[in-house]
Image (cartoon, coloured by chain):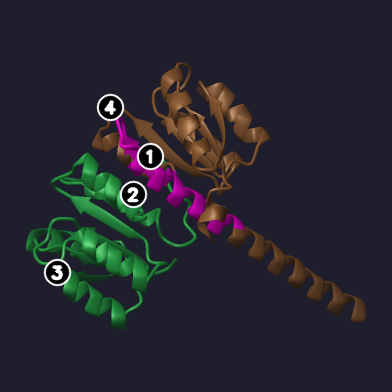
Amino acid sequence: MSTADAMRARVLVTDDEAGIRNDLSDYLSHLGYHVSVADDAGSTLSQVTETAYGVLLLDDILPDESGLEILPRLLDIRPSMSVIVMTGCPTVKSVIKAMRRGACDFVVKPFELDELKTAVYRAAQRNQRLVDEAFRNCKDTTRDSGTVMNSVSQD
Amino acid sequence: MEHPSILVVDDELLIRDLLYDFFQDQGWDITVAESGEKALEILQKKKVDVLLTDLRMPVMDGMALTGRVRKSFPDIPVVIMTGYPSVESAVSALRNKVADYITKPFNVNELYKRVESHLPGEEEETV
């Protein structure tokens, strides 16, 4: 996948701090991503349901539910979405939880924008790879069912 | 899976012996290695369903071993265990697509549950 392809990914930034949301949104938009924002768990769940985001930057501490709590539900809705968990209070337990719940990356605040740029790019590539795999599998299944149908119709 | 296979890599004999006896009792085909280099040799010759490796080992540590395994055997889930957990190493494990990160000392039954959940076809247990 080319750099330009990765940077066409839709990115959702969830953080309850308006300053962080806006800074990240401006920075990632400037890099070429299509960026939306959410400020709590509820609106993140509804936006992910409505839109096929490729990458989600998810703050752990949110006013209604924690990011790590809603992570499995988000991935049930969008299994190929790449989730980067962000936190200002990292612990080994929270990283393990993020890993076990399907996050693909974990960034500690305050972070360098270059670190974030790399993490989002890697996450977008991962998402594109998973989408391509799903598409290939879907095509294979359709082709196999076609073969079965042909063989049934010939019997 | 009837007799799943596991490769355990740890430079501590005590841990290798403990896990060898435990996994064998559970009906697993277990192989042990005392170093990352030895583990790579074994992987060239033997099919393994899960790799369980210590993080801190001389010469090739668990993360370096994971990197080599990811390149040559991308389908083998790697579980890291460590007595020196840190946010940095856990994040590095996550970025290297490690399946799980277990801290020592561990309850062997808990470790078993975690390892088992990464077998192909098993539903991963979330926390």
The location of residue A46, given as percent across then percent down, is: 62, 28
Neighbours of disc 2 within 10 Å: few (<14), some (14-19), many (20+): many
The location of residue A107, given as percent across then percent down, is: 34, 38
Distance, label 1 to label 2, CA atoms, is 9 Å
Kindly report which numbered mark, 4 or 3, lies closer to the viewer in this rendering.
Answer: 4
Residue carrying label 4 = A89
Asked if the residue under mark 2 is in contact with the one under mark 1, i.e. CB atoms within 8 Å, the reply is yes
Dot 4 and dot 2 within a common chain: no
Asked if the residue under mark 3 is in contact with the one under mark 4, i.e. CB atoms within 8 Å, the reply is no
Determine the residue positioned at 71% across, 66% down.
A139
Question: Left or right: B18 with respect to A21?
Answer: left
**Which region of the structure is painted magenta?**
A102-131
Distance, label 4 to label 2, CA atoms, is 17 Å
The location of residue A30, given as percent across then percent down, is: 50, 38
The quadrant of the image that shows the N terminus of chain A is bottom right
- Identity of the amino acid at label 1? Ala
Residue carrying label 1 = A98
Residue B5 seen: no
- Identity of the amino acid at label 2? Leu
Residue B14 seen: yes
Dot 1 and dot 4 within a common chain: yes
Question: Left or right: B122 with respect to A114?
Answer: right
- Could you tell me which chain the residue with mark 2 belongs to? B
Element class at badge 3 = loop
- Identity of the amino acid at label 3? Ser
Q: Which chain is green?
A: B
User: Above or below — where is A59 with respect to A5?
Assistant: above
Residue carrying label 2 = B94
